[in-house]
Image (cartoon, rainbow, N blue to C red):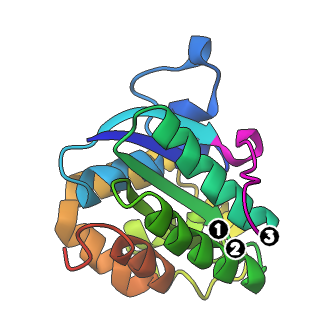
């Protein structure tokens, strides 16, 4: 399943947050590690930063977040991808969370053949990284980036935890992060 990633930076995208010339195969982001657990045989072939997504403009009035999600999915369709895996930090913006959910649902209606796994990390992807390393209830942390950094862990620590613990570890992480649970449930294997 040829898969495209979409995220805000290196934590989500790993090597795909960099230009092609600077990508290293062993630079894995959190979304790639998670995609390997929630998709059947994913072939992670590309990724894009949120700031680089061309806004989808066809049709009615949509929020910026909706245009970004639809733009990412359109880019995947135009690039002959089978799946899109994305996350967006909520960053305290509850309206962003609803807009992303609405856009994901609309994208699934527009491109039913495209597998879409996506949602909002509350408050940031570091919440999912905290949950993946089984540290604490993650979505309640008001500044997960600061908490993650204060624990002295790297993105690679989270990726290794996800990869080594597999589906059982993901199930535990989902109990610590309702937003991660919602993200997993948006995909083709909601029950895991």
Q: Nearer the viewer, residue 99 or 32?
A: 99
Please state the extent of the stretch shown in magenta in the rendering.
49-62
Q: Which mark is residue 142?
A: none
Q: What residue sits right under mark 3 in the picture?
A: 63
User: SS of the residue at dot 3?
Assistant: loop
Horizontal side, residue 45 vs residue 179: left or right: left
Residue at the limit of the structure toward the top, as seen here: 21
Observer-side mark, 2 or 1, equals: 2
Residue located beneath label 2 in the image? 90
Residue 103, percent from left and from top:
60, 70
Q: Residue at x 39, y 73 (%)?
A: 186
Instruction: Measure the alpha-carbon separation of dots 2 and 1.
Output: 6 Å
Name the quarter where the N terminus is drawn. top left
The label shown at residue 124 is 1
Whether residue 60 appears in magenta in the rendering, the answer is yes
Decide if residue 153 is in sight here: yes
């Amino acid at each position: 399943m040829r898969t495209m990633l979409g995220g805000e930076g290196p934590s989500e995208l790993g090597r795909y947050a960099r230009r092609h010339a600077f990508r290293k195969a062993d630079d894995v982001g959190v979304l790639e590690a998670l995609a390997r657990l929630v998709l059947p045989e994913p072939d992670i072939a590309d990724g894009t930063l949120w700031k680089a997504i061309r806004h989808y403009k066809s049709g009615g009035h949509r929020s910026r977040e909706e245009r970004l999600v639809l733009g990412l999915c359109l880019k995947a369709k135009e690039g002959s991808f089978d799946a899109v895996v994305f996350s967006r930090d909520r960053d305290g913006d509850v309206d962003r969370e609803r807009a992303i959910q609405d856009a994901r649902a609309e994208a699934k209606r527009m491109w039913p053949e495209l597998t879409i796994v996506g949602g909002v990390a509350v408050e940031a992807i570091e919440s999912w990284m905290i949950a993946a390393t089984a540290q604490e209830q993650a979505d309640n942390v008001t500044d997960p980036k600061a908490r993650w950094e204060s624990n002295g862990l790297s993105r690679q620590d989270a990726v290794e935890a996800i990869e080594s613990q597999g589906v059982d570890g993901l199930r535990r992480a989902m109990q610590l992060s309702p937003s991660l649970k919602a993200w997993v449930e948006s995909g083709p294997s909601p029950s895991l």
